[in-house]
Amino acid sequence: MSPRSASVNEELRRRSRERLLQATVELVGERGYEATTLGDIADRAGSARGLISYYFPGKRQLLQSAVHRLMHRTLEAAMAREPHTEDGREPLARAIDAVLGLARDHPVLMRTHMAGILQAEGFVRCPEQQRLAELLRGAVARYGSADVDADYPLLRALLMGAVFALLLPGAPMPLASLRAELFQRYGLDWELGVPPGGE
């Protein structure tokens, strides 16, 4: 039997990493962070536990990469949805709705993610985060920003603040109010994107 080619090995590694990220999203969403072990994640992914440490320095970094992957894929799907438009306001509206929708649909996962960012390890820069950043930067550029390097971090901060406000235990803000505030700030019509109740 001939050895596998480098491209086949690379594809197998990519798939293995993807399974670990997906298993993390599922398990933390179901059980929470503390109740999910690396062994549980490896079992759900059908992988050896040693593979986790091969790809990720620890559980917190694995979780952040997994959530960034979910955010990237959700945002990518929202941007690809019909109808396509030349108006840069629509992609920005879709981006805002995609992120707010993740907080609404995956509260345990997103709350855990936000808490992790505030830990000592801070914000993890990983391939998934970079893909997410590219999409958000692209939305800011299409919107017509004259200074994407300044406007993208501000949008990211505003979205993180909105997610925090949606998920704050005991005092959450309504999604519609947060959306209205963000849409007003960017001069977006309520009908753009996916208005609440319009899914």
Image: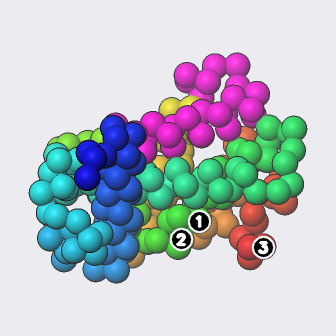
Residue 72 as seen in the image, left or right of residue 51: right
| Among the 4 quarters of the image, the one containing residue 111 | bottom left
Asked whether the residues under the numbered discs 1 and 3 touch, taking CB atoms below 8 Å apart as contact, a structural biologist would say no
| Among the 4 quarters of the image, the one containing residue 134 | top right
Q: Tell me: residue 57, above or below residue 6.
A: below
| Boundaries of the magenta span | 125-151
Asked whether the residues under the numbered discs 1 and 2 touch, taking CB atoms below 8 Å apart as contact, a structural biologist would say yes
Q: Report helix, strand or loop for mark 3.
A: loop
Looking at numbered disc 2 in the image, what kind of residue is underneath it?
A: Arg
The answer to whether one can see residue 114 in this image is: no
N-terminal label among 1 and 3: 1
Q: 149 and 44: which one is in front? A: 44
The residue that mark 2 highlights is 104
Place of residue 196 in the rendered image (x, y in percent of width and height, measured from the top left): 72, 70
Place of residue 150 in the rendered image (x, y in percent of width and height, measured from the top left): 55, 23
Residue 132 as seen in the image, left or right of residue 151: left
Q: Specify few, some or many for label 3: CA neighbours under 10 Å numbering under 14, 14-19, or 20 or more.
A: few
Looking at numbered disc 3 in the image, what kind of residue is underneath it?
A: Gly
Residue depicted at x 43% and y 51%: 68
Q: Specify few, some or many for label 1: CA neighbours under 10 Å numbering under 14, 14-19, or 20 or more.
A: some
As for residue 136 lying within the magenta part, the answer is yes
Residue 130 as seen in the image, left or right of residue 98: left
Q: Tell me: residue 73, above or below residue 194.
A: above
Using the numbered discs, state the Cα–Cα distance from disc 1 to disc 2 in whole angstroms.
Answer: 5 Å
Q: Report helix, strand or loop for mark 1.
A: helix
Place of residue 198 in the rendered image (x, y in percent of width and height, measured from the top left): 78, 73
The residue that mark 3 highlights is 198
Place of residue 61 in the rendered image (x, y in percent of width and height, measured from the top left): 25, 49
The residue that mark 1 highlights is 101
